[in-house]
Image (cartoon, rainbow, N blue to C red):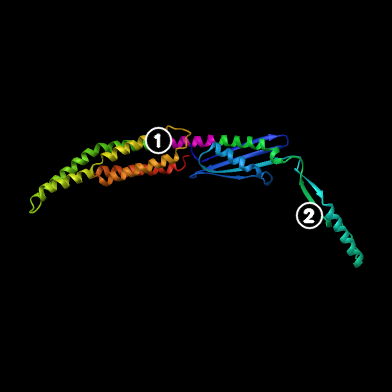
Amino acid sequence: MSMTGYGRGEAHGGDVAVTADVRSVNHRFLDVHVRCPSKFLSWEPRLRGMVREALRRGKVDIFLGVREWGKTGTSVRVNREALDSFLAEANRIRQECGLPIELTFRDLLGVPDLFVFAPEGADPAEEHWELAETALRNAISMLQTSRSEEGGRLRDIVGKAVAGLGSISERIASLSIENKELAIVKFKERIQLLSGETGIDPGRLHQEAAFLLDRLDITEECDRLRSHLVGLGKLLEQPGDAVGKRFDFLVQEVFRELNTASNKSAHAEISELAVTAKNELEKIREQIQNVE
């Protein structure tokens, strides 16, 4: 499964419509952000919970829109105490100062807190929650389909790269014997030259040679490399599972074994193959950054 995708869902009920847009990109963990109208902010925890049930990783943005026809959801009330106080004070000023004050409705609109906007009927967040839930489920379903399709493309790319690494690994393993034999020949030549020098202990030379030859042996590295590549192949056969982090770990292990084998090797072709393999690994690493 890829971590990149988009989904959209809608739900209608009477004179209300709810739309949900969900977008996701790659992220180390699951990071959910919700944006919805202020009077529906109580939906946020439930919306986040729905996403957490469906997804494992990714930065997910949810955009929720609510459209209501023929209703405002609020009613206007007059603050009678404020109105009476305002009119009484205006009348007092007119009498004391002898001013011809004539109040209009426009004057009343400028009085702070004179008109109170209160919710009308049931809580709209609870009343429309089922529509929001349906819309988001539809959006998540579309998002999962999108992530799955992109994941299939990534699986094909990574699968080819892993197969190529397998071929390189087998070639390195076949050259490891030749690598050791080449090292033995070079050491024998060097030992023969040194053995003729005064004060050189032949037994000591052979002991050092055996030690160095053992250090040049890359058999264990080849075995571990083969094992890690088998592990990568198995991860490719687990569609829908969150394998991104395990993939990243095995890629690092493969890189480590290739690097060690290259450093220990005395064979030029093994070093060249290791460089080629590292380039393939970088391609894999780039792709799996977007794998869930």
Q: Is 145 a magenta residue?
A: yes
* Residue 168, quarter of the rendered image: top left
Q: Which amino acid lies under the numbered mark 1 shown in the image of this protein?
A: Gly
Res. 159 mark:
1
Near mark 1 (Cα within 10 A), the count class, few <14, some 14-19 or many ≥20, is some
Q: Position of residue 270 (x, y in %)?
A: 26, 42
Q: Is residue 229 left or right of residue 54?
A: left
Q: Which amino acid lies under the numbered mark 2 shown in the image of this protein?
A: Asp
Marks 2 and 1, the one that precedes in the sequence: 2
Residues 210 and 159: in front is 210
Q: Is 30 a magenta residue?
A: no
In the image, which residues are magenta? 143-156
Residue at 21% across / 43% down in the picture? 214
Q: Position of residue 47 (x, y in %)?
A: 61, 40
Q: Main secondary structure of the magenta part?
A: helix
Residues 43 and 131: in front is 43
Q: Which residue is mark 2?
A: 113
Q: Position of residue 161 (x, y in %)?
A: 38, 38
